[in-house]
Image: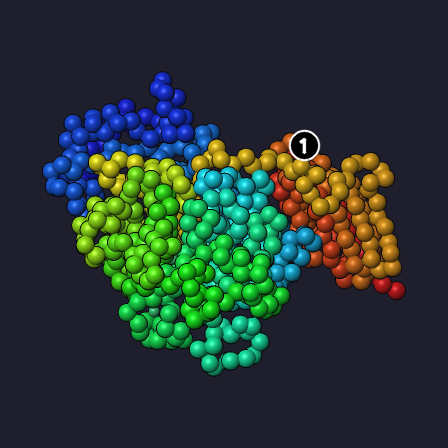
């Protein structure tokens, strides 16, 4: 068997010419043509993929042609990937297939490069949602219309503090955060499909609800909730309570069901207790029925939120139209995701080597929800998450085996329970994968070309950087079922992405300068009357424009002890000319992109001279772009 890399591609095969005269969709121009692969096979590139446990019948297995992931200087990627930053608290934006990091979007973290958390507006947003300086983002999900990404919003959870955030994809900035009072940690996050009518945060950690000191050491009284929010405006609508815990979540495609896993049906508090039972749950929430209960007043208000009783013994779950159905699945499941056609919810076993296939329509037909289970495939050890290519295949990460397994969904429905037969192929990854995500896998129409596997461990894959290792996000090409999965790129990732969404670039329409009408604060032009320094007692209010290479005032004089508010507009029209208002020794750092207006409030508590300067390198006279803040000593 020859290694696929033994034969160097010819210069033709290595071509990066994306304008070659053919009729392919320019979006997919970089994917090699079928004839490359035939040529590759003909020149002796037969054999198994490096690191691939070949399950295809031996000699027929051709390697994939070398897939071109190069995005030459000046060219753009075909996709955006939005990766959660884990306990960095942010979102990272990558281009795919280059895997270049394009931007970071601070969400729950204070971040100086973008001045996030420094100006009054973002500071207050963080203060009003709990005042924490960090969060733990896991599940970034992009809004959809008709089960297709619409590029409007991205929603993400905070596992650390029980919050959900909304990111505006016009400006690539966090614009709203909701503190969910009945959540200790919000883990899963996903909108209700097909149209993002609601956004869900999945409460993971069981606590007394309300958590006000009652039932401290009586875990049988603990619970968790699924929280529903409207997307725009971003408002908390209701919770539904369960006894067990809730973990990951995904939406059905028809606005009816929302699925989560639960690994703690035991309602335990120790590892031993939480792993005692042979089965836990996929919890299926019937959203219209829950909404009807809210409308009918069948809830208890807790912490200002209508909370519907969805526990197993709830009277609302009696009868023909239960609000919440509990499906038994093997012990301590983790990921759950709905197939692109909306037929099945597939849950990964984590402690059990299987994925369980639930037929969603059957949930309305069967008396015993366990009768909705139509398949159970033995995929390997430690299955965590499943993604889709839109061609009927599922791809599941195996944390323990350090592999990705590709399997056939309908074959799993046809096969005996527990069969390995639906498995098509396994490929090693490096190492210990958590999530994986295929291009547009969460929509009704996955693109079927790229797959990113988010490996928790990188070990020997990169230059050593001390005891804290980067993660390793590996890019696979999955567009050729005959050739199999091809590993094409390792990408070190700063700790610690958990999940991602990959969105076709043409679905987004980001702004390159601000529209002043979209901002809360009024634009400040260079007109004299719009630039002023006003005193009211010991409060000083300053409004000034800025542009290359000066601020509206050369000097600003205040008194020791004054509370100073500076509001400033970057009046530049030209994209990418960013300024800032930075003041040494006052923790002031406000980024101002073109046409943006922000304000910052601080106390001038030490007399002296302070140079207000611009921290973005904006022009040749960037260093000269500064003003003096003169703080006069108090009498
Ligand atoms: S995740 Cu949050 S523990 Cu598997 Cu979706 Cu990493
Ligand atoms: Cu403006 Cu540097
Ligand atoms: Ca369990």
| Residue located at (48% from left, 33% from top) | 506
Q: In the rendered view, would you say 304 is above or below 357?
A: below
In the picture, which quadrant includes the N terminus? Answer: top left
For the residue pair 351 and 483, the one nearer the viewer reads as 351
Residue at 30% x, 72% y is 277
Q: Secondary structure at mark 1?
A: loop
Q: Quadrant of the C terminus?
A: bottom right
Drawn side of residue 567 relative to residue 156, left or right: right
The single residue placed furthest to the top in the displayed view is 21
The percent coordinates of residue 313 (x first, y second) are: 43, 71
List the residue tagged with mark 1. Answer: 573
Residue 467, quarter of picture: bottom left
Q: Position of residue 360 (x, y in %)?
A: 36, 52
Residue 520 x, y percent position in the rendering: 71, 46
Q: Residues within 10 Å of mark 1 (few under 14, many from 20)?
A: some
58 vs 414, left or right, is left
Is residue 525 in view from this perspective?
A: yes
């Amino acid at each position: 068997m020859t290694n696929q890399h033994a034969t160097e591609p010819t210069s033709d095969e290595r071509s990066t010419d994306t304008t070659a005269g053919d009729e392919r969709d320019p979006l997919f121009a970089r994917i090699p043509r079928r004839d490359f692969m035939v040529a590759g096979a003909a020149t002796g590139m037969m054999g198994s993929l490096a690191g691939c446990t070949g399950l295809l019948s031996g000699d027929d297995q051709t390697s994939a042609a070398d897939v071109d992931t190069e995005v030459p200087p000046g060219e753009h990627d075909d996709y955006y990937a939005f990766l959660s930053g884990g306990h960095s608290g942010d979102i990272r934006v990558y281009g795919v297939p280059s895997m270049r990091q394009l931007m970071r979007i601070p969400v729950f973290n204070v971040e100086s490069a973008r001045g996030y958390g420094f100006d009054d507006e973002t500071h207050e947003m963080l203060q009003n949602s709990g005042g924490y300086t960090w969060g733990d983002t896991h599940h970034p999900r992009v809004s959809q219309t008709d089960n297709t990404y619409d590029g409007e919003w991205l929603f993400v959870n905070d596992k650390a503090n029980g919050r959900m955030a909304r990111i505006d994809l016009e400006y690539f900035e966090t614009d709203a955060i909701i503190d969910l009072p009945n959540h200790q940690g919000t883990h899963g996050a996903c909108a209700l499909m097909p149209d993002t009518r609601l956004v869900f945060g999945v409460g993971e950690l069981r606590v007394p609800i309300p958590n006000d000191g009652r039932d401290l050491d009586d875990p049988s009284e603990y619970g968790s909730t699924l929280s529903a929010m409207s997307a725009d405006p971003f408002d908390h609508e209701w919770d539904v309570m369960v006894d067990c815990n809730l973990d990951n979540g995904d939406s059905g495609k028809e606005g009816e069901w929302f699925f989560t896993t639960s690994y703690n049906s035991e309602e335990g508090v120790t590892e031993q207790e939480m792993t005692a039972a042979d089965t836990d749950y996929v919890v299926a929430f019937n959203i219209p029925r829950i909404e009807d209960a809210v409308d009918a007043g069948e809830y208890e208000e807790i912490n200002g939120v209508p909370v519907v009783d969805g526990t197993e013994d709830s009277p609302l779950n009696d009868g023909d139209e239960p609000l919440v159905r509990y499906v038994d699945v093997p012990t301590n499941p983790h990921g759950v995701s709905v197939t692109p056609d909306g037929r099945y919810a597939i849950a990964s076993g984590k402690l059990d080597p299987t994925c369980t296939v639930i037929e969603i329509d059957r949930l309305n037909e069967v008396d015993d929800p366990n009768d909705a289970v139509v398949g159970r495939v033995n995929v390997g050890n430690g299955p965590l998450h499943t993604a889709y290519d839109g061609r009927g295949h599922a791809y599941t990460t195996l944390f323990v085996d350090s592999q990705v397994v590709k399997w056939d969904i309908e074959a799993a429905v046809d096969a005996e329970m527990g069969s390995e037969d639906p498995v098509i192929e396994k490929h090693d990854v490096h190492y210990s994968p958590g999530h994986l995500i295929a291009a547009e896998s969460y929509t009704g129409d996955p693109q079927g070309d790229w797959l990113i596997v988010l490996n928790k461990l990188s070990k020997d894959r990169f230059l050593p950087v001390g005891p804290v290792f980067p993660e390793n996000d590996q890019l696979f090409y999955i567009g050729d079922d005959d050739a199999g999965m091809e590993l094409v790129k390792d990408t070190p990732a700063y700790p610690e992405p958990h999940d991602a969404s990959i969105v076709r670039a043409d679905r987004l329409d980001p702004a390159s300068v601000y529209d002043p009408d979209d901002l809360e604060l009024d634009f400040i032009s260079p007109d004299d009357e719009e630039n002023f320094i006003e005193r009211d007692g010991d409060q000083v209010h300053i409004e000034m424009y800025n542009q290359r290479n000066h601020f509206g005032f050369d000097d600003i004089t205040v008194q020791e002890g004054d509370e100073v508010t500076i509001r400033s507009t970057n009046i530049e029209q030209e994209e990418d000319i960013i300024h800032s208002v930075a003041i040494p020794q006052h923790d002031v750092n406000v980024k101002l992109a073109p046409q943006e207006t922000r304000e910052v409030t601080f106390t001038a508590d030490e007399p002296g001279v302070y140079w207000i300067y611009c921290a973005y390198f904006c022009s040749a006279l960037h260093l000269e772009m500064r003003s003096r803040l003169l703080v006069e000593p108090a009498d």
